[in-house]
Amino acid sequence: MPNMKVVGTGMYVPDRVVTNHDLAKLMDTNDEWIIQRTGIRERRYVPPGMTSADMIEQAALTAIKEAGIEKDEIEAVVSATLSMDHMFPGIAPFVQDRLGLNGCAVVDIRNQCTGFLYSLAIADAWIKTGLYKTILVTGSEIHSTGLDFSTRGRDVSVIFGDGAGVFVAQATDGQDGPGVLGTDLHGDGKYAKALWTEAEGSVFHPRLTHKMLDEKRLFPQMKGQLVFAHAIRKLPESMKTACEKAGLGIQDVDFWVFHQANLRINEFVCQGLDIPLDKTLNNIDVYGNTTAATMPIVTYEAKKKGLIKDGSIVGFAAFGAGFTWGTIIMRW
């Protein structure tokens, strides 16, 4: 049975840097308050007119070049984002057209912070069943155009940034070579409203009203303490389960790619599982939470720093809205 190998990675973040001091001019907050609660010092925002498809294209070209393939070898595009360029269709068709891949399969994944993790699991399943041999897996977000930059929205708005990351996944032969060794995915919809954006939506008649705008119901809302409590409990459980499925222990994993939602969550998880900090890379301080783009961005930077090498056992772990969470263990 074929297995999935990641043969190329790429990332793109906008040039505009927005610091905590910049946000303090817009709302009642300060650099120390943001760093203590999130670990974030700055984030990137897109300029007017830049789309997610623009960012994905740049990241994809890097990944395709690294993979050493021709674009026409790509048979499917799996795209994760919560911030589509338009209400519909999803982002994948726009990415496909931008890269000249017209005709291949396309699908969007709406799993927010675990979007890229789920997309990777889908790509792995498609490859293992022989459906496709080469898949472009993308994660992208533009948060900056959908945040409440007032004191009312500060708990959420200081967290998020914009960016994109891409994997080129390809079928490989052999059970002892690169590939996914264990996957563990979960969700619990009873907490869906603990981290969500209520409006606009098809449940409303009409979907968008001036009252919704006035009440700021178009901005994300979060019960931060509830999210934190579940994340630090569910992530370690999932990481252990995925390792067991792979026939490994936590300490057998050479490097952990964590979603960058909050630095305190990642540090708490590592401390509880005795994972040395040099087995991880946190970049939330410079990019913030880029949601579906986070994991491929971390992976790209970790590879460039030599933290992920051929043959490394790499763990991907994420928790986010839905609630959804999970882990993938992979031999690189």
Image (tube, rainbow, N blue to C red):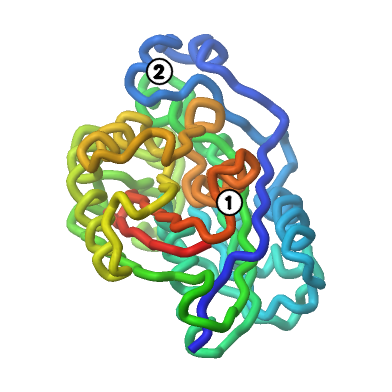
Q: Around disc 2, counting alpha carbons within 10 Å, would you say few (fewer than 14), some (14 to 19), or many (20 or more)?
A: some
Q: Tell me, yes or no, if residue 126 can be seen here.
A: no
Residue 247's disc is: none
Which quadrant of the figure has residue 135?
A: bottom right
- Residue 41 at x, y = what percent? 50, 20
- Residue 179 at x, y = what percent? 49, 71
User: Could you tell whether 182 is left or right of 309 in the image?
Assistant: left
Tell me the residue at 56%/55% (across/down). 139
- Residue 266 at x, y = what percent? 33, 37
Q: Around disc 1, counting alpha carbons within 10 Å, would you say few (fewer than 14), some (14 to 19), or many (20 or more)?
A: many
Q: Tell me, yes or no, if residue 135 can be seen here.
A: yes
- Residue 324 at x, y = what percent? 30, 57
Residue type pointed to by label 1: Ser
User: Could you tell whether 270 is left or right of 90 in the image?
Assistant: left
User: Could you tell whether 37 is left or right of 77 in the image?
Assistant: left
Q: Is residue 57 above or below residue 245?
A: above
Residue 140's disc is: 1
Name the residue nearer the viewer: 70 or 216: 70
Residue type pointed to by label 2: Ile
Tell me the residue at 58%/51% (across/down). 140
Tell me which numbered mark, 1 or 2, is placed earlier along the sequence: 2
Q: Residue beneath label 2, please?
A: 35
Q: Is residue 331 above or below residue 132?
A: above
Tell me the residue at 39%/40% (across/down). 220
Name the residue nearer the viewer: 221 or 69: 69
